[in-house]
Image (cartoon, rainbow, N blue to C red):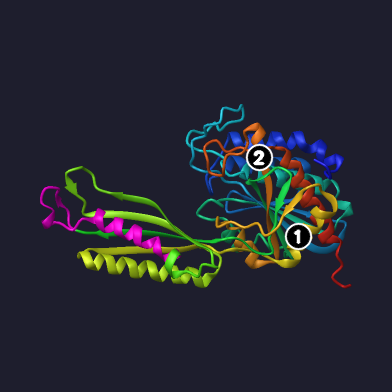
């Protein structure tokens, strides 16, 4: 890829090898023992100092030759409970688990960035911390990593992260000042009616019927209660009820997600879910319980850190910038961005000509590995530019 320096191009075979190792041996959140050990082995071999947090999280620290600011680079390591359908030689060797979101690539890029910066640490005016974070897919590793001190000793002044993104083609980068990704809330509801015989419905309160009406009514929240100029999604991803075709179910279990950029929109949706459940259940004589959990806040990019990434890409790397790129998917990078100024961006990785265009979380997800070297180059150039800044000027 044009703009990637020769030394990082030479690192490309290693980046691919590391990524494919991670892909072969996926691990769920807070269970990334083999992944973490691989990272630690390489950091130890290279002489890079590091600390281990939360058993599997790793923070590598690369001090430059001169004192200065501290930049953090974050990568997530965990995989998903998906059975891989790809037939490539590096396909998952763990039944029922798969790197279906690109975290294997994120980890390889971060490892390559750590290696390059360590080899060139004499040129750095400051410090870079490379954070290998567990459990992004759930239950969430960013917040406990922060609480465990990932951003301290030395204290971080800015942070960067990227997401390999098959919604954009190879050769592009998605950037947005402000809200890039949405907040996500998760809720679980149990509707309790009165079970009975399918031939005698008058003796029952059908939890399936009540639940179906709740599902339909919840879809009106976005269409009729939210300003059309706002963005929000209410999804029911799970509906379980009944055990036999001739039995009217006593209970129905619903689970779903709520996504939004504006916290006030999230509060309104939460309130309306309660009201809809209360009204529909009362009208049928049913009852309900609701467990509503606010999980990840929105990913909000800092303007100066976003401009840093934009200027680096525009000045040095042959990538087309896709402005105002946003999604209602969520990411716990948001907690890091609440703690320090930073930027999270999308690195286009789809290549339909090679069949590398399946969406994230699909059992045939894969990406064009050319993107690995580009990711290292962006991180390295951003670190060089960020640390070259003299705050006394």
Up/down of 37 relative to 255, above or below: above
The residue under label 2 is 38
Q: Are marks 2 and 1 in contact (CB under 8 Å)?
A: no
Q: Secondary structure at mark 2?
A: helix
The residue under label 1 is 71
Q: Quadrant of residue 2?
A: top right
| Range shown magenta | 194-222
Q: Is residue 100 magenta?
A: no
Up/down of 9 relative to 88, above or below: below
Q: Position of residue 291 (x, y in %)?
A: 37, 63
Of residue 313 and residue 32, the one placed in the foreground of this image is: 313
- Label 1: few (<14), some or many (≥20) within 10 Å? many
Left or right? Give the position of 192 relative to 105: left
Q: Which mark identifies residue 118?
A: none
Magenta segment, prevailing SS (helix, strand or loop): helix
Screen quadrant of the C terminus: bottom right
Of residue 99 and residue 203, the one placed in the foreground of this image is: 203
Q: Which mark is in front, 2 or 1?
A: 1
Q: Position of residue 92 (x, y in %)?
A: 56, 33
Q: Is residue 207 magenta?
A: yes
Residue located at (68% from left, 66% from top): 340
Q: CA distance from mark 2 to mark 1?
A: 23 Å
């Amino acid at each position: 890829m044009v703009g990637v320096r020769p030394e990082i191009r030479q690192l490309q075979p290693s980046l691919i090898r590391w990524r494919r190792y991670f892909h072969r041996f996926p691990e769920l959140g807070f269970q990334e023992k083999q992944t973490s050990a691989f990272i630690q082995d390489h950091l130890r071999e290279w002489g890079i100092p590091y600390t281990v947090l939360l058993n599997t999280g790793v923070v590598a620290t690369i001090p430059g030759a001169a004192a200065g600011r501290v930049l953090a680079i974050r990568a997530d390591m965990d995989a998903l409970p998906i059975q891989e359908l790809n037939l490539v030689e590096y396909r998952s060797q763990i039944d029922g688990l798969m790197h279906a979101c690109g975290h294997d690539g994120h980890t390889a890029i971060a490892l390559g960035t750590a290696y390059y910066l360590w080899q060139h640490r004499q040129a750095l005016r400051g410090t870079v911390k490379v954070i290998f974070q567990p459990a992004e897919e759930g239950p969430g590793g960013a917040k406990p990593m922060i609480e465990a001190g990932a951003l301290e000793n030395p204290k971080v002044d800015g942070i960067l992260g990227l997401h390999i993104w098959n919604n954009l083609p190879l050769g592009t980068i998605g950037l947005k000042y402000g809200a890039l990704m949405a907040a996500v809330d998760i809720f679980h509801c149990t509707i309790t009616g009165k079970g009975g015989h399918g031939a005698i419905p008058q003796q029952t309160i059908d939890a399936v019927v009540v639940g179906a009406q709740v599902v339909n009514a919840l879809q009106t929240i976005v269409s009729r209660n939210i300003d059309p100029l706002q963005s929000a999604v209410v999804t029911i991803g799970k509906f379980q009820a009944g055990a036999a075709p001739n039995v009217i179910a006593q209970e129905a279990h619903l689970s779903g997600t709520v996504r939004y950029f504006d916290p006030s929109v999230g509060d309104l949706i939460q309130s309306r879910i309660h009201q809809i459940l209360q009204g529909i259940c009362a009208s049928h004589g049913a009852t309900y319980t609701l467990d509503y959990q606010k999980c990840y806040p929105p990913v909000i990019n800092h303007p100066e850190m976003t401009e840093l990434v934009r200027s680096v890409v525009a000045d040095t790397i042959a990538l087309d910038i896709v402005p105002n790129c946003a999604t209602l998917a969520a990411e716990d990078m948001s907690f890091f961005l609440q703690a320090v100024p930073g930027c999270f961006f999308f690195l286009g990785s789809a290549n339909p000509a090679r069949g590398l265009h399946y969406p994230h979380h699909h059992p045939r997800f894969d990406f064009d590995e050319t993107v690995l070297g580009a990711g290292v180059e962006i991180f390295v150039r951003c670190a060089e530019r960020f640390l070259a800044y003299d705050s006394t000027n």
